[in-house]
Image (cartoon, rainbow, N blue to C red):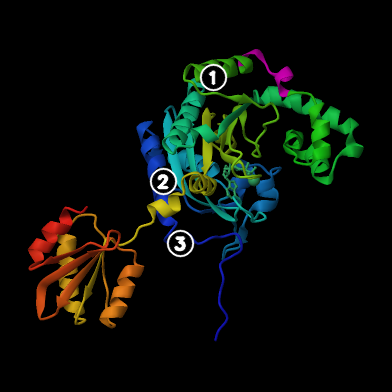
Amino acid sequence: MPQQIRAVRGMNDILPEQTPIWHYLEQQIQDVVNSYGYRKIEIPVLEATELFQRGVGTGTDIVEKEMYTLADRNGQSMSLRPEATAGTVRAAIQNGMLYNQVQRLWTSGAMFRYERPQKGRYRQFFQTSIESFGMPGFEADAEIILLTSRIFKHLGLLDHIKLEINNLGSTTDRAKYRQALVEYFSKHKNNLDDDSLRRLDINPLRILDSKNPEIQELIADAPIMNDYLAKESLEHFDKLLSYLSEHNIPVVLNNKLVRGLDYYNLTVFEWTTDYLGAQGTICAGGRYDGLVELLGGKPTAAIGCALGLDRIVLMLDKLYNLTDKLSPYADISIICNNNDANIATWQAEKLRDQLKNIRVHVNYGGSFKSQTNRAENTKAKFIWIIESKDAPDSITIKCTQTKEISKHANYDDAVSWITKQF
Ligand code: ATP
Ligand code: MG
């Protein structure tokens, strides 16, 4: 026998039992983003590597070690998208969507990162990415946060998560803070690990992201961003916080929250949970006013976030056992006593015409007993038994849950009985 071919490590199949919970989640998200007037955009899975180098930043983990990069047949370097913001911005610039106008966009799909696979962390995973352009005021920050909060409310997750938020200030504020961090960590160079030493040169803010306990001790005494923020930056954030409080959104201020991507300024936030161990962030975002210009467009205010759908599915399942609850079993499974699939197929087609949104299975071939077993295995609510091919109108319906049996002398009676059951 030829050897089996397995899926790529960290890239999962979503099996039929699991697809309904994904559809449910996508539907809930779609309803909410629509209600805020965000419009869907689809962008390619593969883009020029340079887009991510520029858009995500060469000093980030994503670009440094997580991208799936390949050469196409012309030798041009391409990468599978590790996130959707850079592609969305590229598309919006390329299609003239940003000049002097406000845009509210969202997209959803598979992203790819070469990470160590574990629960809630995969090499192919799914994100919904939501972005708005052309609104520099704090109201746009609030809108994205209200929107995500509403998604989590609809999903029943709001009581199980918290909103962590920080202010990264303007580009100038960050440059000053960066300088202060370089000075501080340079004094403690001997205590830094390799990762932090590398970050000290490329992106010292990222040291604050370190999970190493020894580095965390150092971080505790490091200069804090807040001391380096200009008046306007502080005002933007203060207004946002009071807006959120008026809308009853509790926040946790976390001045160590810097986010993995390079392009953020002012507001950054994460929705986090204790339910998923180390993979506790289910949505992350922030303002990125510099990105459009960095990718060749005119300076444009922008804010966005990405929801980690795989982690949200894990949470929904853990809290509400949704995979089991939503599993789509057949409603009616048809068997024919004398094994005449043709009659069964005719009746199934008629049932599909007459009963909307009902799932009908036909059992083809095999003895009456094996057909019955198969019908029961589909976990159908009703087994529709055509008693004999010579008397196709004599129909018995068995309810698999109550074990009730109802006999009918003709097809129409059987239909009107079963219609009342749904
Ligand atoms: P983390 O710190 O967990 O690596 P990140 O900062 O790299 O997250 P973002 O780039 O901000 O993540 O992506 C937004 C969201 O997408 C994350 O909060 C998470 O929910 C989800 N996500 C990111 N990487 C993965 C992955 N490899 N597998 C599953 N979900 C992921
Ligand atoms: Mg990551």
- Callouts 1 and 3 close, C-beta under 8 Å: no
Instruction: State ligand 2's quadrant.
Output: top right
Q: Return the disc, 1 or 3, that comes first in the chain's sequence.
A: 3
Q: Is mark 3 within 8 Å of ligand 1?
A: no
State the quadrant of the N terminus: bottom right
Q: Whole-percent x and y of residue 2?
A: 55, 84
Mark 3 to mark 2 CA distance (whole Å)? 16 Å
Position of residue 96 in the picture relative to residue 421 (left or right): right
Q: Is mark 2 on a helix, strand or loop?
A: helix
Mark 1 to mark 3 CA distance (whole Å)? 42 Å
- Callouts 3 and 2 close, C-beta under 8 Å: no
Report the residue that reaches farthest toward the bottom. 1
Q: Mark 3 points at which residue?
A: 15
What span is in magenta? 225-232
**Residue 227 located within the stretch drawn in magenta:** yes
Q: What element carries label 1?
A: helix
Q: Which of marks 1 and 3 is in front?
A: 3
Q: Mark 2 points at which residue?
A: 26
Amino acid under label 3?
Leu
Amino acid under label 1?
Leu
Q: Nearer the viewer, mark 3 or mark 2?
A: 3
**Of the pair 291 and 264, the residue shown nearer to us:** 264
**Of the pair 305 and 282, the residue shown nearer to us:** 282
**Residue 259 located within the stretch drawn in magenta:** no
Measured along the vertical axis of the image, is residue 285 above or below residue 311? above
Rendered residue at 84%/38% (across/down): 214
Rendered residue at 39%/41% (across/down): 28
